[in-house]
């Protein structure tokens, strides 16, 4: 008899990552390709449309690499729009780091995609994401995971 899974420490994160929202060990040609992969996962998981991925790319083109939020970690996102079906996250780990153009935090090994339906509904998710990423060892656990189930167990 299987033991029940303990209650999630990060319930908002746990629900934000839908099926088909995690890809490990991806090969990205450049930052745009890495962002596209994160956007494609949001589409594949039913959280956004391809138009949202375009808005993610436009945001970086217009504003630069501000999305690189910590050493090795980018948070790709666009503005809330009709292209967002439901709030969600995606995760891409990169087999080889990619330069995003952020001198302080390059190169990037982890790209998190975020889509939100409005300007406030994602606050809980972002709070939990910050707590999770701030925990000792959590980033390395994600980067060393061999499948998405290992990552889901971290939440």
Image (cartoon, grey):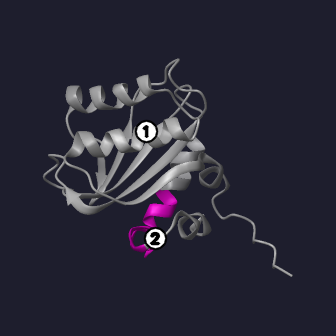
| Residue located 44% across and 65% down the image | 134
Q: What's the residue at 56%, 31% (across, down)?
A: 120
| Image position, residue 128 (x, y; %) | 55, 54
Residue 5, image quadrant? bottom right
Percent of width and height locating residue 25: 35, 63
Of pointers 2 and 1, the one earlier in the residue sequence: 1
> Which of the 4 quarters of the picture holds residue 104?
bottom left
| Nearer the observer, 100 or 120 | 100
Image coordinates for residue 86, horizontal then vertical, percent: 61, 32
SS state under label 1: helix
Residue depicted at 19% across the width and 35% down the height: 64
Residue 139 colored in magenta in the image: yes
Q: Give the residue at mark 1.
A: 40
Range drawn in magenta: 130-144
Taking the magenta stretch, the answer to whether it contains residue 31 is: no
Locate the N terminus and report the quarter of the image it occupies.
bottom right
Residue at horizontal 81%, vertical 73%?
A: 4
Residue 136 in sight from this viewpoint: no
- Give the Cα separation between the discs numbered 2 and 1: 24 Å
- Local crowd size for mark 2, using a 10 Å CA cut-off: few (<14), some (14–19), many (≥20): some
Residue beneath label 2, please?
A: 138
The residue at the far top in this view is 82
The prevailing secondary structure element of the residues shown in magenta is: helix
């Amino acid at each position: 008899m299987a033991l029940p899974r303990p209650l999630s420490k990060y319930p908002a994160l746990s629900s934000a990552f839908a099926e088909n929202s995690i890809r490990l060990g991806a090969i990205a040609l450049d930052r745009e390709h890495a962002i596209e992969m994160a956007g494609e996962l949001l589409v594949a998981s039913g959280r956004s449309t391809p138009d949202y991925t375009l808005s993610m790319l436009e945001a970086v083109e217009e504003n630069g690499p501000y999305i690189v939020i910590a050493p090795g970690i980018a948070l790709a996102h666009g503005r809330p729009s009709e292209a967002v079906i439901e709030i969600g996250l995606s995760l891409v780990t990169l087999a080889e780091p990619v330069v995003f153009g952020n001198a302080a935090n390059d190169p990037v090994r982890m790209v998190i995609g975020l889509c939100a339906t409005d300007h406030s509904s994602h606050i809980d998710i972002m709070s939990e994401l910050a707590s999770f990423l701030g925990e000792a060892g959590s980033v390395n656990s994600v980067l060393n995971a061999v499948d998405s189930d290992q990552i889901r167990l971290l939440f």
